[in-house]
């Protein structure tokens, strides 16, 4: 068979799937994982046996420039850059003649008569009985495509997909594959500009997903992608501009239903795309209709619903902002507690005193955002007295940080240092230490204040912080000392201990050996294969360090004693053998 594609070499394959996926894919191919290799036009297709019982479906599309796109039905294969695609490409590279040339499905189907098509469909339904629901669906481009499809048929297909979900780790992928069948129908309607039927499909899919939301909770990463596809499809129907009022109303209803559903469960972040489309692609009259829907959906406003009400208010304001004069806008903002919007509008209007009054009603947590607005408009100095007063009593770190950063920007380092020390005293961490250190150095007081600070933290037994500081500044001996004290006082801190061991390998290898040996023993005492495997990782480090110190005999004696001491742990002995220890 002649090769109709541009030359494909290992470099091109590695560029597409990555070196590791290509190496793993080549192993799969050499082990016979590729079956039914076919060349269909400019597409390579095959089945690839992976870790599941059923093989994965793999395809790669070529263009004049080389690999254009690819796909695999495995969990990682959506972008077509997995090891199974690597296996398919390795098969094409080594055995192109093994790929059987076949016609495109449309061409094959067109050659069949009615009785043959019926027989073929019956056979398909025996293999995949769930496809029977497709018989009720309208077909884009077909004879039934000129009629309005039944949304209940689409919802039944979604419900059928969820009934077969199962509880294994590939369940979500199977559901998405079934839903994609329905989505493809909607996309095909869209391709032929049948926006009415496309809208029906997308709305039905969204409704089906919302009806089965409880089953989505563990599979969100897969199914949110379907939601976003539906939202984008509905937006395409709105943007088509075909003037069909019924289509536009259905699209808006579907987008708002999804927005309201996620608002009611407190996941507004998932509705941003729908909100944007409802704002950008609608007429003034449609915005007024949407505003009415928002008001009808508005919760009563008790404390439990406060966040939801705020989000509804925000969307409502976005819908109506073009129709409100300044005073009406400000009244709405104040009634709904939207101080950022009111302050921003007041400053734009030059009404500074009113903006300051609104800011004075804000809580401490809201003041940094308001201060940013004042700063944008060049009035941050006018707001600063309020911030200074609030900082005296606030427990809001972001407010203290905002004022500290302004002091530092203006070169008022002493004032900034006071606030940095306050924050560091509340949260003893390395970032706070660096901030205090940097400001103190710029003021020329660091060398004098550092010993006092270290002594203070030692007295307070802040050994974890001291360890981090000593590691940061390359003081390995002090880090070893402080981390040992931490382990004496607190049982936790294993990660920090390992960081100290890694830092000590170069200049204090014996100390690193002691830590790794101690941790290996702790893991073995805990039991379990995973712990034994991690213990072997540490013991391998011990082996490497003994060799670097030319103490091979010490290692030999240690390992013999270690094995003897744990001779009653066969699983550990297996892991030691696997690690070559």
Image: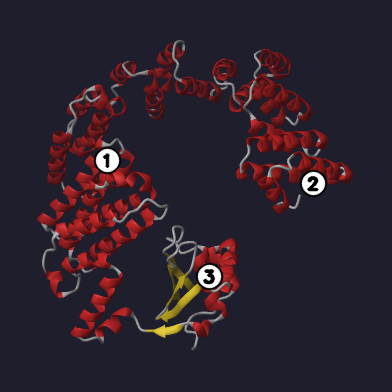
- Asked if marks 1 and 2 touch (Cβ < 8 Å), the reply is no
- 490 sits left or right of 501 in the view: left
Distance between the Cα atoms at labels 3 and 2? 37 Å
Q: Furthest residue to the front?
A: 568
Image location (x, y in percent) of residue 515: 74, 34
Check whether the beta carbons of the residues at disc 3 and disc 2 lie within 8 A of each other.
no
Residue 50 in the image: x percent, y percent?
49, 65
In the displayed structure, does residue 346 sit left or right of residue 561?
left
Disc 1 or 2, which lies upstream in sequence? 1
Could you give the CA–CA distance between mark 1 and mark 2, rounded to whole angstroms? Answer: 55 Å
Neighbourhood count class around disc 3 (C-alpha, 10 Å): few under 14, some 14–19, many 20 upward: many
Which numbered disc covers residue 87? 3
- What crowding class fits label 2: few (fewer than 14 Cα within 10 Å), some (14-19), or many (20 or more)? some
Residue identifier under label 2:
544
Which circle, 1 or 2, is nearer the viewer?
2
Measure the C-alpha gap from mark 3 to mark 1.
Answer: 41 Å
Given this view, does label 3 or label 1 mark the residue nearer the observer?
A: 3
**What element does badge 3 sit on?**
helix
Q: Which label belongs to residue 262?
A: 1
């Amino acid at each position: 068979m002649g090769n109709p594609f541009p030359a494909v070499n290992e470099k091109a394959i590695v560029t597409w799937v990555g070196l590791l996926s290509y190496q793993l894919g080549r192993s799969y191919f050499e082990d016979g994982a590729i079956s039914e290799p076919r060349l269909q036009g400019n597409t390579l297709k095959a089945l690839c046996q992976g870790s599941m019982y059923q093989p994965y479906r793999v395809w790669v599309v070529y263009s004049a420039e080389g690999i254009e796109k690819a796909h695999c039905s495995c969990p990682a294969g959506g972008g077509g850059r997995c090891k199974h695609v690597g296996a398919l490409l390795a098969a094409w590279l080594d055995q192109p003649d093994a790929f059987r040339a076949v016609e495109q499905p449309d061409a094959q189907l067109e050659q069949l008569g009615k009785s043959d098509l019926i027989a073929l469909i019956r056979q398909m339904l025996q293999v995949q009985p769930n496809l029977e629901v497709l018989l009720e669906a309208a077909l884009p481009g077909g004879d039934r495509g000129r009629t309005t499809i039944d949304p209940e048929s689409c919802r039944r297909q979604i419900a059928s997909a969820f009934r077969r979900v199962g509880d294994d780790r590939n369940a979500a992928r199977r559901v998405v594959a079934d839903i994609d069948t329905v989505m493809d129908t909607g996309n095909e309607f869209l391709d032929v500009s049948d926006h009415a039927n496309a809208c029906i499909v997308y709305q039905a899919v969204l409704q089906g997903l919302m009806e089965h939301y409880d089953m989505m909770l563990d599979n969100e990463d897969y199914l949110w992608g379907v939601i976003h596809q539906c939202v984008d499809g509905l937006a395409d129907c709105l943007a088509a501009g075909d003037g069909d009022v019924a289509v536009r109303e259905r699209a808006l209803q579907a987008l708002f239903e999804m927005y309201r559903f996620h608002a009611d469960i407190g996941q507004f972040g998932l509705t941003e795309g729908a909100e944007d489309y409802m704002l950008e692609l609608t007429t003034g009259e449609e915005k007024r209709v949407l505003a009415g829907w928002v008001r009808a959906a508005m919760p009563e406003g008790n404390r439990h619903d406060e966040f939801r009400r705020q989000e509804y208010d925000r969307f409502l304001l976005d819908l109506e902002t073009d129709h409100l004069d300044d005073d009406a806008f400000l009244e709405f903002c104040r009634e709904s507690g939207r101080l950022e919007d009111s302050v921003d509008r007041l400053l734009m209007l030059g009404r500074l005193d009113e903006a300051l009054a609104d800011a004075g009603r804000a809580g401490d947590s809201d003041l940094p955002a308001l201060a940013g607005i004042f700063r944008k408009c060049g009035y941050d100095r006018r707001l600063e007295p309020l911030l200074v007063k609030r900082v005296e009593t606030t427990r809001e770190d972001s407010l203290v940080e905002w004022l500290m950063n302004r002091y530092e920007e203006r070169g008022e380092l002493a004032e900034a240092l006071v606030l940095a020390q306050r924050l560091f005293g509340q949260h003893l961490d390395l970032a706070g230490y660096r901030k205090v250190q940097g400001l103190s150095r710029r003021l020329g007081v660091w060398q004098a204040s550092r010993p006092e600070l270290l002594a203070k933290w030692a007295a307070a037994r802040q050994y974890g912080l001291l360890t981090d500081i000593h590691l940061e500044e390359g003081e390995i001996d002090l880090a070893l000392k402080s981390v040992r004290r931490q382990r004496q006082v607190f049982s936790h801190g294993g990660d920090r201990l390992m960081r100290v061991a890694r830092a000590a390998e170069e200049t204090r290898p014996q100390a690193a050996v002691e830590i790794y040996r101690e941790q290996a023993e702790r893991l073995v005492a805990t039991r379990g294969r995973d712990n034994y495997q991690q213990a072997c990782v540490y013991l391998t480090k011990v082996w490497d360090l003994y060799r670097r110190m030319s103490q091979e005999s010490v290692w030999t004696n240690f390992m013999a004693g270690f094995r003897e001491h744990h001779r009653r742990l066969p699983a550990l002995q297996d892991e030691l053998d696997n690690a070559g220890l």
